[in-house]
Amino acid sequence: FFFYFTSSHFTTTMVEESQVISRYKEANQSHVLKYADTLSTEAKDLFLKQLDSIKVEELSGLLGAALADQQNQDGKDDEVSPFSKDVGRTTDADESTLSYSKGIEAISNGEVAALVLAGGQGTRLGFSGPKGMYDIGLPSGRTLFQLLAERLKRLKEVAKCDTLPFYIMTSPINHEETSSFFKKNNYFGLPENDVLFFQQGMLPCMTNDGKIILEKADRVTMAPDGNGGIYPSLKNSGMIDDMRNRGTKYLHVFSIDNALTKIADPVFIGYCVKTQADCGNKVVWKTGPYESVGVVAEKGGKPCIVEYSEITTEMAEQTDGNGRLVYGAGNICNHFYTLDFICEKVVPNLGNMYHIARKKIPYYDATTKSTVKPESNNGIKLESFIFDIFPLSERMAVLDALREDEFAPVKNAPGSASDSPDTARAYLSKQSQKWVTEAGGNLTGDLDSLCEISPMTSYGGEGLEELVQGKDIHCPFSL
């Protein structure tokens, strides 16, 4: 039996090896197998599995398209102009009421799904786990994941809907820990089959002339393909098929590091559906001309995000007749798509979406038999951004939300002056106080103390009247 198992194992490896050698030779990347014969059977087997999982046939095409994009000096395409369509505002009460009804209707009909980009670690926060598992210091100890999941659960109750799937894009470094965290917490009350995990893609790093770099004799240097990797990952993981099977029509996508995200926001979804948008972007207006954030604009008449460094001082300072910044629609990674747009426009264009990023890439040195960390850029990573597909949109919607209601980034370590757990907590506390006041409650006590309304109590300020109306609510409070 042992002999049969071993020979069968070797046969499998040999078949796999000959196929891998053939594929890499065909792709002009056979140098990666240079040290394969020096490896132990086990190490070689693992290495071949890694090589087999890489779509080496596609690499030169992706790199070629990225290089062509970088070298494209056609000035017309690069000419930046203001976003030319109407921008909706959540402060427009009548429009928001109509949008909300439309959004709730779509959610009730089971046509909406939510998706969070959660591949990052909490390193900058001084936290070693997935960023979504970070506790921002609320009285309840809720993590970023819990805030989202419980808001979604409450929204399902408000919309009286049976299913509202929650897709979570992880990365190879945090996939297991993230899915285990949800399982351990019983998916925070959501049905297990409505919480779906899939991994962000990885691509090999390459030399400047397009050769795959080895990190060790038995391992290719891999890097995440940027948050734009959501699109190939949705396709490759089968999640697009899952959405189709569920009858999903509209997708709300956002990043994990905003503590105020209104997950599957009915106002945003309803606004996009109402305006027949194929793609939408929720923004917050810049606080001033020099805030370094990407903004919605147009290039060659097509919608896009332009980075702060791409616009002149004159453009940054330009205002309209109402004194509002023309280039002011700050991008907060909060997007809407129709599933048709992703399937019909985005997926067919996946080969053209990568950019060249020149980086310091660790490489294997055969002489010292060790990994070298270079001091200067020695190679290429292919990256893409989630907003790279905006120019494919024919009916882009932009909705301007109030910063204090919807944007509390958690990026920097505790104690930082901005975008920290402390600033996010303060935003959430002020929002809780505002909701109590709007529902007819009278705040007493220390207004600077930490207050919290559970997402299970209210999704967006609704349903609080019977708890607080005509009553003194003493701060700090937890409702």
Image: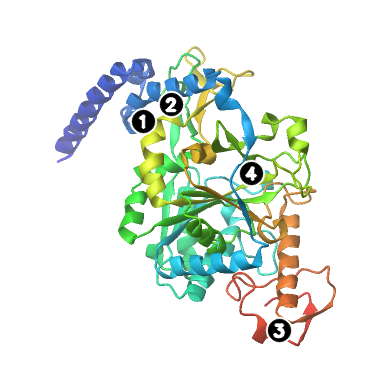
Which quarter of the figure has residue 474?
bottom right
- Write down the residue under mark 2: 220
Seen as rendered, the residue at the extreme front is 321
Q: Amino acid at mark 4?
A: Thr
Mark 1 or 4: the one toward you? 1
Q: Position of residue 336 (x, y in %)?
A: 50, 52
- What secondary structure is marked by label 2? strand
Report the quarter where the C terminus lies: bottom right
Between the residue at mark 1 and the residue at mark 4, the CA separation in whole angstroms equals: 28 Å
- Left or right: residue 341 versus residue 120 is left
Determine crowd level at label 1: few under 14, some 14-19, many 20+ residues with C-alpha closer than 10 A. Answer: some
Q: Disc 1 or 3, which lies upstream in sequence?
A: 1
- What secondary structure is marked by label 4? helix
Q: Disc 3 or 2, which lies upstream in sequence?
A: 2
Give the residue displayed 21% in from the left and 34% down from the top: 9
- Write down the residue under mark 3: 468
Residue 322 visible, this angle: yes
- Left or right: residue 49 versus residue 312 is left
Which quarter of the figure has residue 453?
bottom right
- Write down the residue under mark 4: 123
Q: Amino acid at mark 2?
A: Val
Give the residue displayed 65% in from the left and 86% down from the top: 466
Q: CB of mark 1 within 8 Å of CB of mark 4?
A: no
Residue 188 visible, this angle: no
- Write down the residue under mark 1: 54
Q: In the rendered view, would you say 460 is above or below 263?
A: below
Q: In the rendered view, would you say 26 is above or below 51?
A: above
Q: Amino acid at mark 3?
A: Val
